[in-house]
Amino acid sequence: MLGLEDFVRFVEGTDEEEKVKDLKEAFKMYEMDGCGYITPKSLKRMLSRLGESKSVNECAVMIAQFDLNGDGVLNFDEFRVMML
């Protein structure tokens, strides 16, 4: 029989897995080029599709805020930190 603590851990784990799945889907929408990271150009393109007009430079500044390794792009782990 599943105890309350085990049940809570199970439910919380499921929620986390669902969040990661959703984040991966969102990440794919933003990276677009299949390169495994979000560039300022791909971010600009996606924001344009969402009705937000930003320059490539503005997108680079947005990325820099969460670019933990300083390479100028966002990998999935950096994107995850930004979104959570």
Image (spheres, rainbow, N blue to C red):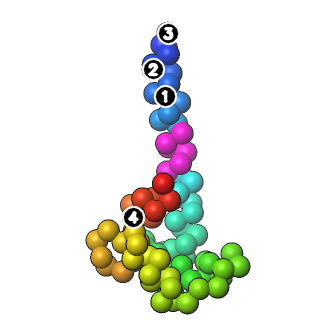
The percent position of residue 32, horizontal first and vertical second, equals 54, 76
* Nearest to N terminus: mark 1 or mark 3: 3
Q: Residues within 10 Å of mark 4 (few under 14, many from 20)?
A: some
For numbered disc 1, what is the local secondary structure? Answer: helix
Q: Is residue 79 left or right of residue 50?
A: left
Q: Which mark is residue 10?
A: 1
Give the image location of residue 33, x and y in percent.
51, 79
First to last magenta residue range: 15-20
Q: Nearer the viewer, residue 83 or 38?
A: 83
CB contact under 8 Å: marks 4 and 2? no
Q: CA distance from mark 3 to mark 2?
A: 10 Å
The total number of labels drawn is 4
* First-in-chain label (4 vs 1): 1
Q: Which residue is mark 3?
A: 1
| Mark 4 / mark 2, whichever is N-terminal | 2
Residue 78 in view (yes/no)? yes
According to the picture, the residue beneath numbered tag 2 turns out to be: 6
Residue found at x 31% / y 78%: 71
Nearer the camera: disc 4 or disc 3: 4
Position of residue 19 relative to residue 83, above or below, is above
In the picture as drawn, the residue positioned furthest to the top comes out as 1
Residue at (61, 77) in percent of width and height: 46
For the residue carrying disc 2, how many other residues have a C-alpha within 10 Å: few (<14), some (14-19), or many (20+)?
few
Name the residue carrying label 4.
Answer: 78
Q: Nearer the viewer, residue 57 or 80?
A: 57
